[in-house]
Image: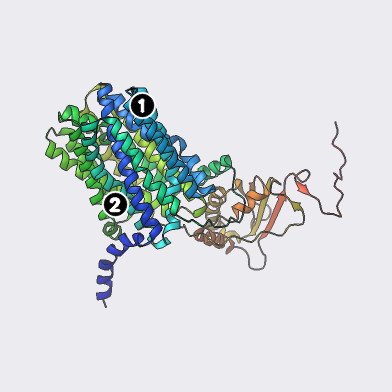
Amino acid sequence: MTAPADTHPVQEPAPGMLAPLSHPVFRGIWVASLFSNLGWLIQGVGAAWIMTQLTTKADLVAMVQTAQMGPTLLLALAAGAIADMYDRRKVALAAISFNLVGAITLAALSFAGLVTPGVLLLGVALIGAGGALMGPAWQDSVREQVPAPLLPAAITLNSISFNIARSFGPALGGVIVAAAGGAAAFAINAIFYTPMLLALGRWKRTPEPARLPPEGLGRAIVSGVRYVFHSPPMRVVLLRTLMLAVSGAAVSSLMPLIARDVLKGGAETFGLLLGAFGLGAVTGALNIARLHRRLAPETLVRISTLVVAAGTAVIGFSTLLPLTLVALFITGAGWMLSVNELNIVIQTSAPRWVAGRALATFQAAIAGGIAMGAWMWGTIAQAYDVPTALRLSALALALLPIAGLWLRLGGRGQGSDEAQPLPDPEVALKLTPRSGPIRIELEYAVAPERAREFYGLLLRLGAIRSRTGGYGWAVARDVAQPERWIESYSCPTWLDYLRQRTRLTEAERELTAQVRSFQASDRPVKVHRWLERPFGSVRWKDDTPDVDPLGPAPL
């Protein structure tokens, strides 16, 4: 009886981890991403080391990390909205082309000897902007490259791709910078963007026909923000991500100074340090599938954060290269496990219509946290010294698991399956897509003894209305007839209301059914849809006078 249960988990990890590579599109883009990640990391080594040659200020050296990650913070929401609105393949192609031009320009300026600290930061920031645009489109497109059951494994493989590159790219970058200078690192980065252009060009993506026209960019950004704001599980993940990124940014942002000032090494030492961190991250990624089966997300993130704290503390006290390399290996493994777990929770929990924007908010949280943390730890290192900044970072990381007592992570993939769209309601007016605002009222009849339970569910339903596109949600109870309840909310236009009806997940549809189950059996739920501007926003039927029956408005 127990044998099948014992053998089944043993057989899951290998196919679960490698199965996405059996899909040609994912495999081609994954291999290409390995090259682009390798080039980006080689460029990072070149930029960071060139900055140490241009200035002795620790805060400017740390600002290289801020320049790399800052654009993601600033552009993430717009990039996520674009990924949800347009063809993700074309968006990724445009972004990688922009990065290619930026890398070529930075290489040319470096070969010409025209790079200053300001020019270097600007060039790195522009390439970071291209990466910010590409990130949501590329990562969200994984859903179209593999079946849904393989999505967590595909997400992990993408993380492994980056960390394989991190294991070898920095060391290779250190050798290249030492032998040929930073300009060569920028040129190689440009060359390594080419495989991604070819892989995306070969992908014959077939877009799913949209049932409704896309939102405008501004409205799409607002919709994404409102979804996250009204989704407590998403807010928890983003807050935990931000705190982790700020607290743990010291190691990556101060690593050039660890190599130069603490260990008294050169570019080769810097490359070895980055390689040790990346090798640890790959090791952590290879164990994710096994840890997923044994640990809940909250437990996994707490343990891995403590691992990062321990590794950072050792780095803060070490002056020996072998000890620092071991500590960086441990830190890289813990960092990979923490960030990847948070990423999986986001990507498997967000419904399809807002997946790009949800992913973008995650990227903004981690990039913004690293950018702010790099500035903060760089400032502390400038005021005191690098070991002090690292020790304070370790202390902050060690305290983070306490946040889990109040900001507890939910499960993986909860409530992300989209339900079938509701049918369009029957109307008598010739509404246009821009007709509105539309006010929706639902009248319930609920036995008074069930009022408290009903009200609790209704509050949860109100959050669903708000995050799927409703505004001004409210609930009222009749003081003369206590069994009578009115739920109401608005949508800006008729088209927005139709969109709102397509966005429910299966879990949200089930909650809606629970609310309706409180309805008295002999009285159906009454639904009223009101056009708040009945004149000027509709097309009248042929037999209706196209005039205001109340006459012209008084002057």
Residue occupying the point 54% across, 47% down: 85
Question: If the image is split into quadrants, where does the C terminus sit?
Answer: top right
Disc 1 residue type (three-letter): Leu
Residue 21 x, y percent position in the rendering? 34, 59
Residue 125 x, y percent position in the rendering? 39, 31
Residue 51 x, y percent position in the rendering? 28, 26
Q: Is residue 306 visible?
A: no
Residue occupying the point 27% across, 67% down: 9
Which is closer to the viewer, label 2 or label 1? 1
**Looking at this view, is 103 or 474 the one in front?**
103
Identify the mark at residue 109; answer none if there is no mark.
1
Q: Given the current orientation, which residue lies at the most extreme bottom position?
A: 1
Pick whichever of labels 2 and 1 is earlier in the sequence: 1
Q: Which color scheme is applied?
A: rainbow
Tag 1 secondary structure: helix
From the viewer's perspective, is 465 left or right of 243? Answer: right
Q: Which residue is mark 2?
A: 300
Say above or below: 354 vs 76.
below
